[in-house]
Amino acid sequence: MYGFRKKEPPFVRAIRDLQLPDNKKEVLIERYSSLVNELQNKTYSITIVFHTARIMITVGSLIVPALLSIQYPSSGSINIVIYWSTWTISLLVTICNGLLALFKVDKQYYYLHTVREQLISDGWQYIELTGKYSGFYTPKLTPTHENQFIYFCHSVEKIRMRQIQEEYYKVSESSSAQHVGGAATGTAAAIEQGRTEVITTDKSALIPPSPLKGDLANIPEEVRKMILQLSGSMLEGVNDDLPKKEKGDAEKTHFKDGATGTVSV
């Protein structure tokens, strides 16, 4: 741990050598590296607590029955020492076991190690341009650190949000369901204002990264037609609940084949 703090991590040195603008390198180092260091410190602390408590529970559980099985031939001072030693060890075993269950140390130990290794693996995949950064998001473009930067940042934030929700507060579906009641009203208001966006109701989710220049033109024709048909069917469902006048105005905003618009998925 001391060496990790004093020596710059290898992925940070690799980030400095990437063909990226300096501001993006600083974003990666300040955000990504700080998250990895934070998880490194947490895993180091939780590892000490976890293994120390497990050793005390395991060793103490073996010593207590052994001390209780000793036959006392006479009532001397040695018996008093054995009695209080047994009582102390038994109390320590019970306390350690209770604290492990209360603070869920074992769950945090496994989960934090998993998240840390996931972050490190994701960073090396981006640096090496392999895995999902080898052109999975941009099939028509040659993968570079520049055009994969936004997808890597989005992936890091998703991992971070899952870790925060698991550790502190997990946003359930009930919280996002509060927006469903006003979904039709918000969509109708957008139609009245002449906008062609499809408004999403789950505002707690991370917004997917914006497409790069040229990505929309690289979408296959069949997929583009499916998106346009889907957006049109969603607007038709809203039109059924609108008055006739508003319904007539809303029909003018439907997507046509070849028209441009923004669809939030």
Image (cartoon, rainbow, N blue to C red):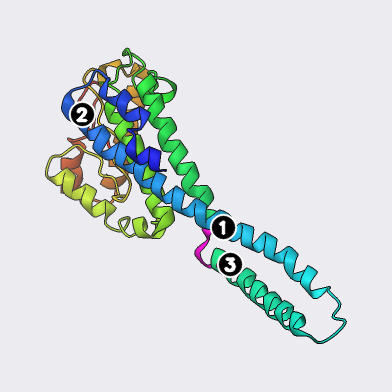
Where residue 224 sits: x, y (%)?
A: 32, 23
Q: Spatial distance from mark 3 to mark 2, Cα to Cα?
A: 46 Å
232 versus 72 height, above or below: above
Q: Spatial distance from mark 3 to mark 1, Cα to Cα?
A: 9 Å
The amino acid pointed to by label 1 is Thr
- Residue placed under numbered mark 1 in the picture: 52
Is residue 158 visible in the rendered structure shown here? no
In-front residue for pair 106/87: 87
The amino acid pointed to by label 2 is Lys
> Which mark sits nearer the N-terminus, 3 or 1?
1
Q: Give the quarter of the image for residue 247.
A: top left
Q: Is residue 101 left or right of residue 188?
A: right
- Residue placed under numbered mark 3 in the picture: 96
Q: Which residue: 26% across, 33% down? A: 28
- Residue placed under numbered mark 2 in the picture: 24
Q: Spatial distance from mark 1 to mark 2, Cα to Cα?
A: 41 Å
Q: Secondary structure at mark 1?
A: helix
Where residue 133 sits: x, y (%)?
A: 38, 23
Q: Give the quarter of the image for residue 261.
A: top left
Q: What quarter of the picture does the C terminus occupy?
A: top left
Range of magenta residues: 101-106
In-front residue for pair 28/210: 28
17 versus 25 height, above or below: above
> Which mark sits nearer the N-terminus, 1 or 2?
2
Q: Is residue 70 left or right of residue 160?
A: right
